[in-house]
């Protein structure tokens, strides 16, 4: 019996589990992170997903000592880089079909076809507004913005015939069409963006960032890309994952099903994100922190 403690001392100790915090807003791009927390695919790592509620909330999580992997709007990620927070972008996401001009009237190929029509937008200076302004500056001969201060207000105004057109993200666009057969998708923002910028890619609106405490984690990144590929093959299944943290998205499967989700690992696809940032810089430098992110942001 005296030999037992000596024998136990020779046995390898089990690896201590490491906690990784995952975070994101109520959008499709958060689903691959939630899948990691749902499946726990990396041995020795415990993933926990907790939504962030505002850019300031996300900022606090980035500066904490705990390793963090989070989805952020692409402009917000660039601002974090510009303010010296040491974030690193490990992937970007394109969700083709996620943004559409929904309203009454014929399909349009150019914003000038709206001829001064008011377009409902959620917030001034945020990504949907920036995309529209880059496609064509507002004015009497193009379009005029009507900022609602809410993600769902555009849908409500459309259904109440208070506006003719609204910029809606999925699943709100599909919900609007289901509730009023007189509405249609007048234009896909991706198509208008490609025509206005001559860029081949749709806007990479979501960026997966990590904080300095995250360091280099190839196994975690591989698990993320695998989860993304699984969801991209059936994008509607993201609704179930998101509903656990965002109950309002429980019925989003139909709207999400029409998305074409594209994973852009970085730095391999840095050029796509750099091209997007250059277009935003041209119209609103402050939206990305006043300058293009440096190579360290892309992990180069």
Image (cartoon, rainbow, N blue to C red):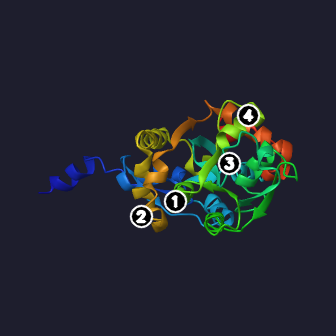
> Where residue 7 sits: x, y (%)?
20, 49
Lower position in the chain sequence, tag 4 or tag 3: 3
- The residue wearing badge 2 is 244
Q: Quadrant of residue 25?
A: bottom right
196 relative to 191 in the view: left or right: right
User: Looking at the rendering, in which quadrant would you find the N terminus?
Assistant: bottom left
- The residue wearing badge 3 is 74
Label 3 or label 1, whichever lies nearer to me, is 1
Q: Is the residue marked by circle 4 packed among few (<14), some (14-19), or many (20+) residues within 10 Å?
A: some
Q: Is the residue marked by circle 1 packed among few (<14), some (14-19), or many (20+) residues within 10 Å?
A: some
Q: CA distance from mark 1 to mark 4?
A: 27 Å
User: Looking at the rendering, in which quadrant would you find the C terminus?
Assistant: top right
Lower position in the chain sequence, tag 1 or tag 4: 1
The correct choice, above or below, for 156 with respect to 116 in the image is below
Judge by depth and name the residue closer to the eye, 57 or 246. Answer: 246
Lower position in the chain sequence, tag 2 or tag 4: 4
> Where residue 136 sits: x, y (%)?
81, 44
Q: Quadrant of residue 183?
A: bottom right
Q: Is the residue marked by circle 2 packed among few (<14), some (14-19), or many (20+) residues within 10 Å?
A: few
Judge by depth and name the residue closer to the eye, 78 or 254. Answer: 254
Residue at screen point 72% across, 60% down = 121
Lower position in the chain sequence, tag 3 or tag 1: 3
Mark number displayed over residue 175: 1
Lower position in the chain sequence, tag 2 or tag 1: 1
The correct choice, above or below, for 38 with respect to 219 in the image is below
- The residue wearing badge 4 is 195
> SS for tag 2?
loop
Q: CA distance from mark 2 to mark 4?
A: 38 Å
């Amino acid at each position: 019996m005296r030999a037992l403690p000596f024998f136990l001392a020779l046995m390898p100790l089990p690896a201590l589990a490491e906690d990784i915090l995952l975070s994101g807003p109520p959008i499709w791009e958060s689903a691959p992170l939630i899948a990691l927390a749902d499946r726990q695919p990396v041995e020795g790592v415990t993933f926990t997903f907790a939504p962030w509620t505002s850019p300031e909330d996300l900022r606090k999580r980035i500066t904490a000592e705990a390793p963090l992997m989070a989805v952020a709007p692409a402009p917000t990620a660039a601002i974090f880089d510009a303010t010296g927070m040491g974030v690193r972008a490990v992937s970007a996401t394109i969700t083709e079909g996620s943004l559409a001009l929904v309203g009454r009237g014929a399909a349009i190929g150019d914003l000038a076809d709206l001829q001064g029509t008011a377009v409902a937008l959620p917030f001034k200076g945020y990504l949907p507004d920036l995309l529209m302004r880059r496609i064509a500056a507002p004015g009497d001969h193009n379009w005029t913005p009507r900022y609602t201060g809410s993600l769902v207000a555009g849908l409500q105004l459309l259904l109440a015939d208070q506006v003719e057109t609204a910029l809606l993200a999925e699943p709100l666009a599909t919900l609007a069409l289901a509730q009023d057969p007189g509405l249609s998708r007048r234009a896909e923002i991706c198509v208008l963006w490609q025509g206005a910028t001559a860029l081949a890619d749709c806007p990479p609106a979501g960026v997966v960032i990590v904080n300095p405490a995250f360091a280099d984690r190839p196994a975690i990144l591989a698990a993320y890309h695998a989860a993304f590929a699984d969801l991209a093959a059936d994008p509607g299944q993201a609704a179930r994952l998101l509903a656990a943290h965002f109950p309002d998205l429980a019925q989003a499967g139909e709207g999400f099903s029409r998305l074409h989700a594209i994973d852009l690992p970085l730095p391999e696809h840095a050029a796509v994100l750099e091209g997007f940032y250059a277009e935003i810089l041209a119209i609103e430098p402050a939206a990305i922190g006043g300058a293009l992110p440096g190579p360290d942001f892309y992990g180069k």
